[in-house]
C-alpha cells in the first residue's frame, strides 16, 4: 500500500482520485499540488457564470452542501494536503520525486512520492495570430478568465463580441453573451457548420436556424487572421471580412497539457495526450493519469481519443483512486456522449457522426427521424429529431445525435443509447429499447424505437430516402430531374401547390393507389409528408406499382421547417 | 407467404402487426375484427382525457398528423379491412376459421385465415363484491368508460370519489379527479403502500407524502367489501371504514383476456395469459399473440410476466408483422420499465423492487441515493432519488426505481439503466454509465453514476446504512439503542439539537477526527447528513477509529423530508 500519493493538478480528476483513495486507505498521506490559487471547481459551469445563471463564482467551488472546496476543506474534511500556487517543474521518476516551485516565493523544493497522479488538464488551443494577447481577448478555461469576461461585460465595456469556434464552449458563451447581456455576437467557424465534430450538417442546420432566430451571426469556412486594435481588441480580421468586436472569445478547442509527462519520458500521443492503459496507468506503473490531459479508448472505433469533460475526469479519477489503494478497477473507455443547451433548443449525442463514420472507414447508413417527444396527444409535446448512424455490415450503432426543445427528454434518449453503445448496440436493440412509457414522457412507439426501426428498414433496403440537406439541393433544380409529391391531405399541401406550380404535386396517401396514373414514370419521385411516415407508406405503394426511382424525404416538412428550409418560408 | 391474415383485436398490437405486415407484403389481405365500434386508440391516454389535459376523446384515436384511425383510414391508407362490432366466438384451428358474430345484427359467419393473430387485450380485474355494477362504479379500460366518467364529473354529479387500487391507473385517475376537477379523492389499497408492485416502501413514502400534500386520502391494508347505494353508488365499505363516494373507480389491476386462446386449446398461463415463444408464436405455429393478452419473458428473472403496456404491444406487434411476412424477428422479453406522473412529482422504474428481488430468491442489496438532478450550481436543479437493487453474487442490477420532480430527467436515467438491463447490467456498468454531461442536464458525477458507486461500495462491505424507512423505526426508540450523530455544519443541526436534546448530537464532519472522544462506543452510531455523502465519510473515519457499529442514513435528511418524516416537521 503506498504511503504517499502525490497528485499534480487539483481541479477535477485530481480531487476525485485523492478522495476516493483516502476513503479506501484512510491512514495514507495524499498531497495535491496546483499552480492556481483556486482548486476543485466546476469549469463546465463557466458559461453559466458568464450568463448570470450562476450568480456567484463561489458556487462553482462549493459542494452541494455549500462548503467551499479550498485547502482547509480538503484538510479538515478529507485529510488531504493541498499546495496551491505550486508548479510542478519536473518529475524525477528514478528518484520518485516531483520538483516544484512556489509561484509566490519562487522557492524550489522536491516532493517524494510512492505513487503519482498526473492531472494537468488541458489548455485552450492558441491561434498563433497577431493580436491574440490584446486586452479583450479571452479564453474561458478557468475561473480567472470567467471573472475577466464577466467584469468586462457587466461594466458595459463590450457591445459586440466575436467568438472564434463553434464547439460547445464557443456556442455556450455565444448564448450567454447574446441572451443574457444583449451583446451583438458573431461566431466564426473554420468548418462549414456549427459543432462540426459533433453533429451532421442536417442537424447543424437546425441549430444554426435557431441561433439565427436568436440574432447570433454565423460565419462558416472562415479563418481568423488577426485581432486588431489600439491597445485593446477592436476588430477581428478573417480571410473574408473584418468584424468589429470589443470582446473576443477564443474557443477553438483545447489541447491536452501533457508536457510534464512527455518530458518525464512517459508515452504521449502525437497531440500531446498522456497514454494510459485500462487501469489508467501511464507507461510508468507508479504513475497514473486521466482527465483532460490524457487519451482514452474510443469504444466505437477501438482507437484513442481526447475527451475533455468533467464527467470523464470524475469517473477516471475514481478508477485511479481505487487502483492507488491496490484495487484493479478499469475504465472501459467511452463513446463520447455530450449534451448542450442552445437558447431554447438542445443538442446531444454520442459516438460518431455520419461523416466521422465514413472517415473512420465504416460502410454506414444514417437514419434521421423527427417525432414528438411524448405522446402526440399530450399537451406540451414538441418535436425531437434523432439521427443514428449504423454499420451496414454488423448493424452496430456507431453514433446517435439529436436536437429538440425538451432538453431533459433529448438527453434521456441519447443517454439510453450511449449506455447501450458502451456495451455494444445494434439497430435492433434500439427498436426494442425499453424507454419507460407513459404519455407525459414518451410514445408507445417512442422516437428512440422509431429511429431503430427506420435504420432496420434501411438496412433491409426499404425506406430509401434523402436527408433534409440533400432535399434542399434537389429542390433547387425545380422539377428538372424530380417529381415532388406531397402525400399530405390537400389543405396542408395547398399553399405549396400555389407557390410552386408545376413543381409541387399533391396526392394524399390514402388516395394514392387510385391515382397512380398521375405520376410520371420517367422521373425520380421525391415523396414528402409531415415527418416521413406517410411518405414511407407511399414509397411502398409506388414501388409495389413498379416505380423504380422513389425517394422519401426523411424527417419530412417538419425537418425542413426546423432547418429554416421550408420552401414556402419567406 | 400467407394470403389472408386475420387479427382478432384492433386496439394496439393488432393494428401495429397488421400495418407492419402490409408494408412488407403489400399485396396480402388483412382483416382485423373487434367487438368495439372504436378501434386503434391510445388507452393509456384515458386518465389525461379524464383530467382534461386531452380535451377531445378523438385525440386518442388520431394519428400524429390528425387523421382518425377508423375503418376508412385503415382501408384507404393501409389497405386493411376492419370489421367492428364483430365478436370472435371461437377459433377452429383445424379448419383455420374464426367463427364470429355481428353484435349489431346477430348474424353469425366464419372467416378463414392462413395466419391468425390473437390480440384480445386485458380486462379490469373484477372484485366480485356486492354493488360492483351499480351506476357510478367504473373501470377505466376503454373509451366508453372514459366518456362515462368524464360525463359524470363534468356534470357535477360526483363530489367525492373512491379509487380502489393504487397502481398506475388508480393513481393517475386519482390525480385527474383531485387536481383538475377538485373532487375529494380517497384511494383504498390492499397492500401497505402505493404502487406495491413497482417501488419499495422507502420510495412509496415519498410518493404518499406528495399525494397527501395534494389532499388525496390514502388507506392501506384495507379490503373493499361492497359498494352501497340507493340505485347508484353512494358509499364504499371496507373492512375498516365506510367512505362516502358518488364515483367509484375500480383500478385493482387487469387480467389477460386469454379465454378465446384457451378454448382453442392453445397454451395459456395459470393467470390466463397466452404463452408465446420468442417469435411471438403461440403453441400453434399459425397463430401469433402478444400485447395485453399474452405473457412475455421477464429478462431479469428468466420467468414470464404479464406486462400490459401500449409500448410493449407496439414492439411485439412489429415483431409479429415481420414474422407474418416470413421474417424471423424475435422479441427478447422485457425488464418492465415504467413511468408515471404524480401531480408535481414522478415515479419511474424497471426490473425488480428490493422486496421482489428477495421474493424471487436473490441475495440482493439496495442502494438509495438522493442527489440533484443536474449540476448543483445550476438554477432549477431539484432533488432526485434513485434506488437500485443488485445481486450480491453476480453484481447484476436487478432493478432501479426513482422519484423526483423533473419527470423527463428521471425517466432519462431510468431509461438508460433499463436499456442496459435488457443486455445485462452490473453495478459497475452504472458507475461508468455515460449519461451525457452538461450542467443544465446532469452532474459530472451524475446520480446514475453515484447510485452505481454506492452499490459497488456496499458490495465491498463499505457504506453500510439504513434506509429512510428503517431510520424512522430506530428514531422512534429515541436513543435507547442508537447515538444519532448529525455531521452537518452547526447551523443546520441546531434546530434538531434543540428539539431532541440528549438524542440528537452534532459534530461537523470536518471536526470529527478531533472530537472522537465525544462519541460513545457502547451504542450503534447512526450518522446523518443532508444526503448521505458526509455521513459516509464520517462512517469511514469512525470505523478507522475502531467503532464497530456505525450506520449511515442513506439519502440523509433530504430523504426524510421527501417522505414527510423529518423529525422536526410539525
Image: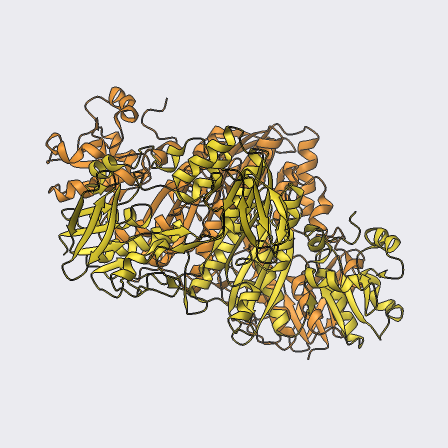
Chain colours: A orange, B yellow
Residue B273 or A211: which is nearer the viewer?
B273
Residue B274 or B388: which is nearer the viewer?
B274
Which quadrant would residue B177 be assigned to in this image?
Answer: top right
Residue A22, how many percent across, how many down? 71, 70
- The residue positioned 61% from the left and 76% from the top of the image is A327
Q: Check the picture and name the quadrant holding the N terminus of chain A.
A: bottom right
- The residue positioned 35% from the left and 49% from the top of the image is A451
Up the image or down, B190 lies above or below B236; here it is below
Residue B519 or A402: which is nearer the viewer?
B519
Residue A202, how many percent across, how many down? 37, 41
- The residue positioned 34% from the left and 35% from the top of the image is B62
Residue A137, how many percent across, how many down? 61, 39
Residue A456, how many percent across, how many down? 29, 54
Up the image or down, A419 lies above or below A199; here it is below
Which quadrant would residue B546 be assigned to in this image?
Answer: bottom right
Q: Is residue B485 left or right of residue B402?
A: right
Which quadrant would residue A221 be assigned to in this image?
Answer: top left
Instruction: Evaluate whether residue B519 shows in this view.
Output: yes
Q: Check the picture and name the quadrant holding the C terminus of chain A.
A: top left
Residue A169 or B471: which is nearer the viewer?
B471
Q: How many marks?
A: 0
Up the image or down, B103 lies above or below A9; here it is above
Amino acid at each position: 500500500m503506498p504511503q504517499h500519493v502525490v497528485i499534480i493538478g487539483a481541479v477535477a480528476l485530481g480531487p476525485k482520485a485523492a478522495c476516493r483513495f483516502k476513503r479506501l486507505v484512510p491512514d495514507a498521506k495524499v498531497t495535491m499540488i496546483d499552480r492556481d490559487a483556486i482548486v476543485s471547481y466546476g469549469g463546465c459551469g463557466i458559461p453559466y457564470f458568464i450568463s448570470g445563471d450562476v450568480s456567484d463564482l463561489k458556487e462553482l467551488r462549493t459542494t452541494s452542501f455549500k462548503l467551499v472546496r479550498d485547502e482547509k476543506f480538503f484538510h479538515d474534511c478529507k485529510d488531504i494536503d493541498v499546495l496551491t500556487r505550486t508548479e510542478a517543474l519536473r518529475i524525477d521518476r528514478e528518484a520518485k520525486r516531483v520538483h516544484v516551485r512556489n509561484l509566490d516565493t519562487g522557492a524550489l523544493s522536491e516532493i517524494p512520492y510512492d505513487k503519482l497522479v498526473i492531472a494537468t488538464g488541458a489548455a485552450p488551443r492558441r491561434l498563433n495570430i497577431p493580436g491574440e494577447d490584446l486586452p479583450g481577448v479571452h479564453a474561458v478555461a478557468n475561473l480567472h478568465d470567467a471573472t475577466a469576461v464577466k467584469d468586462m461585460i457587466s461594466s458595459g465595456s463590450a457591445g459586440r463580441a466575436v467568438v472564434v469556434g463553434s464547439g460547445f464552449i464557443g456556442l455556450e458563451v455565444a448564448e450567454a453573451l447574446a441572451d443574457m447581456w444583449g451583446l451583438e455576437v458573431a461566431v466564426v467557424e473554420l468548418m462549414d457548420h456549427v459543432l462540426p465534430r459533433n453533429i451532421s450538417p442536417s442537424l447543424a442546420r437546425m441549430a444554426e436556424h435557431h441561433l439565427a432566430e436568436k440574432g447570433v451571426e454565423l460565419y462558416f469556412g472562415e479563418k481568423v487572421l488577426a485581432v486588431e486594435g489600439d491597445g485593446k481588441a477592436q476588430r477581428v480580421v478573417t480571410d473574408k471580412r473584418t468584424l468589429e468586436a470589443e470582446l473576443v472569445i477564443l474557443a477553438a478547442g483545447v489541447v491536452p497539457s501533457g508536457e510534464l509527462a512527455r518530458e518525464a519520458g512517459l508515452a504521449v500521443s502525437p497531440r500531446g495526450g498522456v497514454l494510459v492503459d485500462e487501469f489508467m496507468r501511464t507507461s510508468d506503473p507508479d504513475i497514473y493519469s486521466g482527465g483532460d490531459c490524457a487519451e482514452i479508448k474510443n469504444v466505437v472505433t477501438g482507437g484513442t481519443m481526447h475527451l475533455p469533460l468533467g464527467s470523464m475526469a470524475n469517473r477516471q479519477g475514481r478508477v485511479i483512486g481505487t487502483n492507488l489503494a491496490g484495487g484493479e478497477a478499469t475504465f472501459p473507455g467511452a463513446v463520447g456522449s455530450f449534451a448542450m443547451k442552445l437558447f431554447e433548443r438542445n443538442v446531444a449525442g454520442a459516438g460518431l457522426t455520419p461523416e466521422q463514420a465514413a472517415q473512420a472507414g465504416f460502410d454506414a447508413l444514417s437514419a434521421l427521424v423527427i417525432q414528438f417527444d411524448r405522446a402526440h396527444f399530450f399537451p406540451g409535446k414538441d418535436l425531437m429529431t434523432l439521427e443514428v448512424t449504423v454499420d451496414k455490415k454488423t448493424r452496430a450503432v456507431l453514433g446517435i445525435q439529436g436536437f429538440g426543445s425538451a432538453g431533459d427528454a433529448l438527453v434521456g434518449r441519447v443517454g439510453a443509447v450511449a449506455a447501450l453503445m458502451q456495451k455494444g448496440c445494434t439497430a435492433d436493440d434500439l427498436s426494442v429499447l425499453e424507454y419507460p412509457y407513459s404519455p407525459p414522457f414518451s410514445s408507445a412507439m417512442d422516437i428512440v424505437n422509431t429511429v431503430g426501426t427506420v435504420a432496420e428498414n434501411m438496412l433491409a433496403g426499404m425506406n430509401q430516402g434523402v436527408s433534409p440537406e440533400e432535399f434542399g439541393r434537389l429542390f433547387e433544380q425545380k422539377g428538372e430531374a424530380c417529381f415532388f409529391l406531397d402525400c399530405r391531405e390537400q389543405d396542408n399541401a395547398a399553399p405549396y401547390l400555389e407557390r410552386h406550380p408545376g413543381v409541387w404535386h399533391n396526392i394524399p396517401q390514402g388516395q394514392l393507389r387510385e391515382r397512380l396514373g398521375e405520376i410520371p414514370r420517367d422521373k425520380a419521385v421525391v415523396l414528402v409528408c409531415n415527418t416521413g411516415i406517410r411518405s414511407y407508406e407511399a414509397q411502398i405503394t409506388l414501388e409495389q406499382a413498379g416505380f423504380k426511382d422513389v425517394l422519401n424525404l426523411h424527417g419530412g416538412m417538419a425537418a425542413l421547417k426546423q432547418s429554416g428550409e421550408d420552401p414556402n418560408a419567406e
